[in-house]
Amino acid sequence: MKTLERIKIGNEKYDIAVANAELCAITINGVQHTIPYSVAKLISDLAEQIGKEQRRRRKDDDEILEFINKQSDHIAYVLSGGDKSSVAYYGENLLKHTLGEKVPLPAGIEFDDGSTTEEFYKTVSERIRLAIQTARDMRGRMMEKLDGSEPSDPSIFR
């Protein structure tokens, strides 16, 4: 079917063309709509892009959670004292002390006043600071990776 009419309504002239066009059925929440192909294509492209963005966001969340877990593991390792048989030995296992206790300093270390113990909270805060400084790629580029300004590769956080 194809129709072309030139009509005049008042002082206005109109060219009206009617032709067959490709239609599509689109279903949204169980309701089907028949719409022109070009509109269906736009909706399809938009839905695909939104889906990609939503899946990407979940992946980013997973990468951030994995990063946090790895850093937490490293902090726990440092707090526990590390492995005596390797270079990663940090001294006393702080996890066995209570908050009010004094923690012995590593063998051969003492403060200027001759004391060989330190408040638990101070030792823990120093150890956490040390853990953060020694965590792989923790300094400098972590925020750029997490905020998306640099390509994200979760393997760099391991």
Image (tube, rainbow, N blue to C red):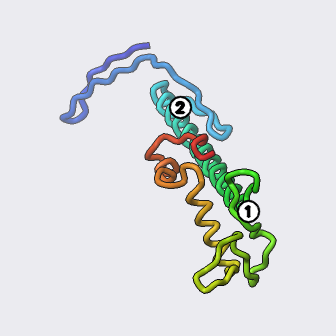
Q: Which residue is located at x 45 percent, y 17 percent?
A: 20
Asked whether the beta carbons under mark 2 and mark 1 sit within 8 Å of each other, the answer is: no
The outermost residue toward the top is: 1
Q: Which residue is located at x 48 percent, y 26 percent?
A: 36
- In percent of width and height, residue 44 lies at 53, 31
The outermost residue toward the left is: 11
| Mark identifier at residue 70 | none
What residue sits right under mark 2 in the picture? 44
In the image shown, does 98 or 10 lie closer to the viewer?
98
Distance between the Cα atoms at labels 2 and 1? 56 Å
In the image shown, does 57 or 14 lie closer to the viewer?
57
Left or right, 119 with respect to 148, comes to right
- In percent of width and height, residue 73 lies at 71, 55
Q: Give the mark nearer the N terminus: 2 vs 1.
A: 2
Left or right, 134 with respect to 73, comes to left
Figure quadrant of the C terminus: top right
Q: Against 7, is 86 above or below? A: below
- In percent of width and height, residue 126 lies at 61, 70
Q: Residue type at mark 2: give it.
A: Ser
What residue sits right under mark 1 in the picture? 81
Circle nearer the viewer, 2 or 1:
1
Q: Residue type at mark 1: give it.
A: Gly
Q: Which residue is located at x 74 percent, y 80 percent?
A: 99
Figure quadrant of the N terminus: top left
In the image shown, does 16 or 154 lie closer to the viewer?
154
